Every structure is written in structure tokens, then in C-alpha cells.
Image: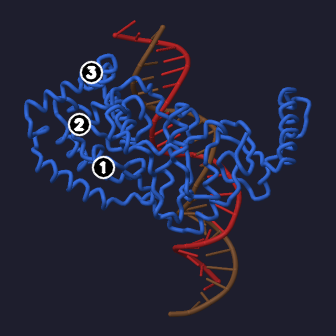
Chain colours: A blue, B red, C brown
DNA sequence: ACCGCAGCTCACACCACACCTCCCG
DNA sequence: CACGGGAGGTGTGGTGTGAGCTGCG
């Protein structure tokens, strides 16, 4: 299984790295993955990692609606903007900054470490934005999280909450809950309860299988395969690429100085600290002094002061941060 | 049932300015 | 018709912000 990012040059595709802070004990996902899900159970499927992908309105809705065991998940409406959780470009648990520096220096981001770190620390500091140019020119870039073994394992539930599939389910369940559909809520709730009775949902799925051993939902195996094939064919023809009309503008925007994300004047490239004034807080003064001192030390050691997502400062060295 | 609060997701405004398009002489 | 110059519009991306939502007490 691979996550092909090459198809997406849209910055908005990576614009929301939603930390899914769902307890790993909350949902029995194994039961869900035992469902005859066309994409999620297909370990050879390439996922389009972008905000509006995986589930395309209409076709996919129909496919999923048709293929899901209706009495189990019939109310899990797949919304048009179902957000596939982005790969975890999570910060490294040690340095708090992860491999995001790869943006400028090495477009090949080490997803595995980020994935693992986010998994370990609960995705506390997931970045919410990412420049599209981080994958620029890497047409063969692909995200290959260590999902396969998990997917193939029967003991993975509770371990793989960072899996896009799982987060997808989470988002779907949230969506369900947001629709106010009480039946859906019950389904979700029952699913969550399955942690206390882990085999509940699986048992009911199995019972449904027993009731109609060759049919899932309203289609038999052949019909389902046909639906899946159509779905895959249509999916492969999607074009989520953000069209950059003027590459020069993009280059300029990428190189343009910014202050808090906003474009800044060329002569304001350095956001210098305010000169001391009588109204400033003494603590703030101390903070600047401390920052200068620490920065001097870091510079002396060959490092660079960097501003982190959350306003904290970190120092980059050749081999990491502190 | 209702309210207030916290926490979360999501869409969008904001910024500077090089470049593009259009119009006029 | 072709050309040059000027004015105004457009596009670009990271971040902050607020609306809207859910869950909980």
C-alpha cells in the first residue's frame, strides 16, 4: 500500500493535518476493517492523499453505500468532503520539529519517523499547513507508512489509530454524529462500546455474513467487484491538481518574506525586536535577553534559531534540534 | 431541556508585489 | 496595424482568526 502524493500539488491538500486525538482504546477498528470495504481492504490500493479524495461524491457514495453491510453501517453517510487524514508529518518527539526541514532541503520527507512519533506522542504538535512545494519535482514521491503489516495483522486494533483508514472512520463517525442521525449515533456509540465488548460488532458482522454468505449488502461478489472496478477507474481519472497558472508567481510567493504567514515588505525581512520602552513588560524584556543569549550560544555552536509552530523557539543544527 | 464553556474543525482573510491584461495615445 | 507606456487587476502561500459544531457539566 502506498500513498501517492504526486497527484496532489494543491497546498490545500495538506492544509489540514488534523490531530486525531482519539483514544486508542475507544474503537474496535478491526471489526470495521473486516468489512468488505472496497478500498480500505485492498492492500494494493494507492490512496490519493488529499483533502477531498478517497471518497468522491456520487460514485464512491454509491459504492460504499452499496457495499457496506446495510444493517451495520447503513447510516454512515460518506460526506463529499470526507477528509482523508494527511500523512503524519509530525514533529519528532525529541526535537519537536520533526523532519519538516526536508521542505527546503530534501523533499523526501521521512514519513515513517513522523508517523511513528505522532503515534507515540498522540499527534500533539501536528502541523496544520504544508507548502505544496515540499513535493515539487518529486513526481514519484510516495508515502509508505508501515500499514501493510498492521492491516494484515489481526492484532492491530488499538495500535494503528494514526492510520488514515482509521481516521477516516473517525471523521465519518464525527460526521455521522454531526448529522444528528440518532441511529447513526447509536451505531457509532455501539462501535465505541465495542472496546468493552470487542467482539460485539464483529459478531454481528459475522452473523450478517452467515445470513447471506455470498452477498454483502445488495450485491454479490461479482457485482461488488464490478462496482469496485468502476470506482477505481473513475478514481484514477480524478484530477485534484491545483493548477498553478503562473509558476513565477509561485516561486515569488515561496521566496517572499513572511511575517506570521503574511507577505512582508522586502525591507521588513527581519522581524527585529522592539526597542526597549518604558511600557514594556519586564518579563518580555527578560525574554528577549534570554533569547539573544541563547541565540548567541547556538550561533557560536553553528546552529540557527528557528521559530516553531507554537511560538516556541528551537535551534537547528546539522544533526537536529534542541 | 437549556445554558455556558471548552475544545475542535474548517474556511477564509490577510499580506506584498511581480506579473499579467487591458486601454489609450 | 503595430508599438510603447501606464493603470489596474491577478495570483501566490503560510498563518491567524472567527464561525460553527460537539461534548460535557
- Report in which chain the residue with disc 3 lies: A
Q: CA gap, disc 1 to disc 2? A: 20 Å
Q: Which residue is mark 1?
A: A56
Instruction: Examine the image and state in which quarter residue A197 appears.
Output: top left
Q: Which residue is mark 3?
A: A186
Q: CA gap, disc 1 to disc 3? A: 26 Å
Query: What residue appears at the point 83 percent right and 37 percent down from the top-left corner?
Result: A291
Mark 1 vs 2, N-terminal side? 2
* Front residue of this view, candidates A175 and A69: A69
* Front residue of this view, candidates C16 and A22: A22
- Report in which chain the residue with disc 2 lies: A
Which quadrant is the C terminus of chain A positioned in?
Answer: top right
Instruction: Examine the image and state in which quarter residue A66 appears.
Output: top left
Q: Which residue is mark 2?
A: A35
Mark 2: secondary structure: loop
Mark 3: secondary structure: helix
Residue A113, image x and y in percent?
55, 44
Residue A148, image x and y in percent?
37, 45
Do the residues indicated by labels 1 and 3 lie within the same chain of the protein? yes
Amino acid at each position: 500500500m502506498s500513498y501517492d502524493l504526486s497527484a496532489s500539488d494543491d497546498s490545500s491538500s495538506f492544509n489540514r493535518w488534523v490531530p486525531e486525538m482519539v483514544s486508542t482504546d475507544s474503537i474496535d477498528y478491526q471489526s470495521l476493517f473486516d468489512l468488505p470495504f472496497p478500498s480500505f481492504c485492498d492492500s494494493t490500493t494507492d490512496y490519493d492523499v488529499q483533502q477531498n479524495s478517497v471518497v468522491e461524491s456520487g460514485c464512491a457514495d454509491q459504492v460504499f453505500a452499496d457495499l457496506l453491510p446495510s444493517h451495520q453501517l447503513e447510516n454512515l453517510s460518506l460526506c463529499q468532503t470526507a477528509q482523508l487524514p494527511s500523512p503524519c508529518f509530525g514533529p519528532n518527539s525529541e526535537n519537536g520539529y520533526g523532519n519538516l526541514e526536508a521542505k527546503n532541503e530534501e523533499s523526501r520527507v521521512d514519513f515513517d519517523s513522523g508517523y511513528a512519533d505522532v503515534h507515540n506522542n498522540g499527534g500533539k504538535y501536528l502541523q496544520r499547513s504544508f507548502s505544496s512545494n515540499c513535493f515539487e519535482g518529486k513526481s514519484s514521491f510516495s508515502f509508505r507508512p508501515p500499514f501493510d503489516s498492521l492491516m494484515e495483522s489481526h492484532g492491530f486494533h488499538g495500535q494503528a489509530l494514526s492510520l488514515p483508514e482509521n481516521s477516516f472512520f473517525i471523521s465519518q463517525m464525527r460526521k455521522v454524529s454531526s448529522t444528528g442521525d440518532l441511529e447513526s449515533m447509536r451505531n457509532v456509540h455501539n462501535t465505541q462500546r465495542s472496546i468493552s465488548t470487542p467482539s460485539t460488532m464483529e459478531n454481528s458482522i459475522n452473523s450478517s455474513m452467515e445470513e447471506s454468505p455470498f452477498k454483502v449488502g445488495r450485491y454479490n461478489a461479482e457485482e461488488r467487484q464490478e462496482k469496485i472496478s468502476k470506482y477505481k477507474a473513475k478514481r484514477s481519472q480524478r484530477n485534484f491538481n491545483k493548477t498553478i497558472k503562473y509558476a513565477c508567481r509561485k516561486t515569488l510567493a515561496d521566496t517572499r518574506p513572511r511575517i506570521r504567514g503574511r507577505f512582508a515588505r522586502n525591507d521588513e525581512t527581519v522581524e527585529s525586536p522592539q526597542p526597549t520602552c518604558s511600557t514594556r513588560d519586564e518579563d518580555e524584556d527578560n525574554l528577549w535577553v534570554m533569547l539573544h543569549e541563547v541565540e548567541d550560544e547556538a550561533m557560536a555552536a553553528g546552529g540557527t534559531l528557528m521559530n516553531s509552530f507554537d511560538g516556541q523557539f528551537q535551534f537547528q543544527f546539522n544533526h537536529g534540534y534542541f
